[in-house]
Structures are given as structure tokens and as C-alpha cells.
Amino acid sequence: MLSKLRNSGDPGRIDLHMHTDRSDGRFPPDDVLGRAFAGKLDAIAVADHDLPNVIPAGVHQRDGRELRLIAAAELSGSHAGRELHLLVYFPGDMPQAFRDFLRDRARIRADRYDAAVAKLGFADLAIADDSARSGERSLTRHHLFHALKAGGHVRDMREGFTLLGGSGVVPLIELPFVDAIRAARAAGGLTSWAHPSLVDAQAWTATFVAAGLQGLEGVRPHIDRRTRNGLKVLADQHGLLLTGGSDWHGWHESPLGTFAVTGERAREFIERLDRSRPTPPADAPAP
């Protein structure tokens, strides 16, 4: 429970990366929250793609347990012709200006989805719906794959993503990753590069640190030892946090709570996040 964080400095079991059906997750937000409680997590960050958090930030209570919901998003950008993702965390509520910025990014995703539909040329594929156009949900390759499978154009996920990954079907995100980092930092967010490969991290971490990057997501399920150790070395070299999350979507993975970050890594993140919280002004002295 969060009392552990307040009383002993131990934040318990945390998971800083998961998704709802507002982007490419399987379950609606309240269901994800319930599954996090069932998985005995103490703090979570729901980081939907290019969307503000729909579950209010702060402490939630169910059945005598407390769980901290950290306002977060997974912001998309591009670098050297590659799409990259940035996890952005806030110690309290997400600022309204950044929420508006994310909704604009989600609307751009809808345009990108329509461009991919046009490129594919299948008459039965529908274009983005009103909720995506209004920035209320975020369309991804996952949605395109399911549309292709429903239409009988592909047989499985491997075939679908092979199709979507070739011939420029899905336009590259036009927001430079360094600008994504700067926008997040300007809004007061704590930034971590989501699931980087070791090769990419070795090539680009210094560039991104210069733009304001504060962490690498190097604690995650199924990561191989060489990548995990290499990311730790890079994090130490650049004074970065090593953040962790399951990147849980709910389609095939184990239940929420199967993976969690604990101990020193969890404590470092929570302490760094809470230190970035704006300090309220002191009361004015009496006249």
C-alpha cells in the first residue's frame, strides 16, 4: 500500500507502462485499474499512445487497498527514419496544455491511419471514426491489423505486420523525437525512452539526453541479459533513471501484476518523480 512509501520509503510493486482500449490495449480504463488492484500493484502508469490519462491521477482505493495512478502517456516521434516512443510521467495531474497537445497528436494519428487505409487500397477498410478524429482515442498499427484480418486480407499478426511494415504503408510520425522530449520537459514531465533496442540506445542516447531525456526503459519482461546490462551501463554513464514496465496490453500477456519493478529501481523513480512536483508557495507573512 502507499503507506509503505510514506512511512518507509518503499514504494512497493510498481508497473510504469500499460495500455487501455483507448489506444491498442484490450480492456477499458476502469477494467485495467481493477486488474492492477487484483495484481497487487502499488503504483501504475497507464501510458496510452499519444493520449492524456482518462483515469484520474492520485490514490485510488478498493477493498482496503491503495494504488497510486501516475498520470502518463506514450508520446510518438521519429528519428533517423525510425518511429520511437517516449514515456512521459507527471507527479500530479497532467497539465491541460499537454493534454491538449496529446489530443492533437491523436488527431494526427487518425489522419495517418486514413493515409495507410488509402495506401492499402482495400475498399472494405473503414477510415478513422469520430472518436479518433476528436482525439478521444488513438489509432495504431494494431487497429489496422485487426481491420485487415477481419477483411480476410491477412491470416495472422506476423503476416499483417509484415504488410504494414513495408512499402511505406504507414506514414512516419512527423514529430522529431528530440522535439517530443523538449515538449514533455517543458510541460514538467519526467521522460523515459520506451523499450529502446541496445543498438539504438548506444547510437542515440547522448543526442536525446542533450534534448532533456531523463531515463531509459531497461527493466521489462523478456529483455535479454546483454540488452539489460547494456542499457544499465548507458543509464549510469549519462546519469539516467532505469525505468521499468510491462508494456501490458491484455491481449496475450500474463495478468497485470505478474511483472513489477521493486526495490531500489522503484524507489529511485518515485523519489525522482515526486521531487519534480511543483512546490506550493509559502503563506505570505502576516503584516
Image: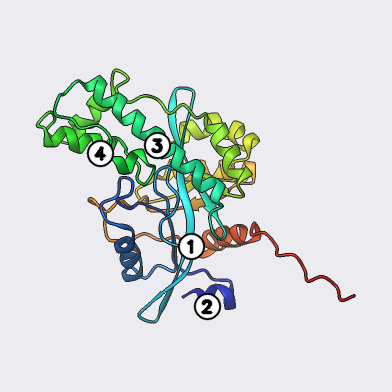
Residue placed furthest toward the bottom: 64
Residue appearing at x 57%, y 32% in the figure: 178
**Residue 154 at x, y percent in the picture:** 13, 30
Q: Which quadrant, please, contains the C terminus?
A: bottom right
Q: Which kind of residue does numbered mark 2 sit on?
A: Ser
> In whole angstroms, how far apart are the C-alphas of marks 2 and 1?
17 Å
Residue appearing at x 46%, y 75% in the figure: 1
Q: Which kind of residue does numbered mark 1 sit on?
A: Ala
Q: Which residue is mark 4?
A: 143
> In whole angstroms, how far apart are the C-alphas of marks 3 and 4?
15 Å
Disc 4, disc 2: CB below 8 Å? no
Q: Which kind of residue does numbered mark 3 sit on?
A: Arg
Mark 3 vs mark 2, foreground winner is 3
**Residue 56 at x, y percent in the picture:** 45, 62
Residue appearing at x 18%, y 35% in the figure: 147
Q: Which residue is mark 3?
A: 107
Q: Which residue is mark 2?
A: 3
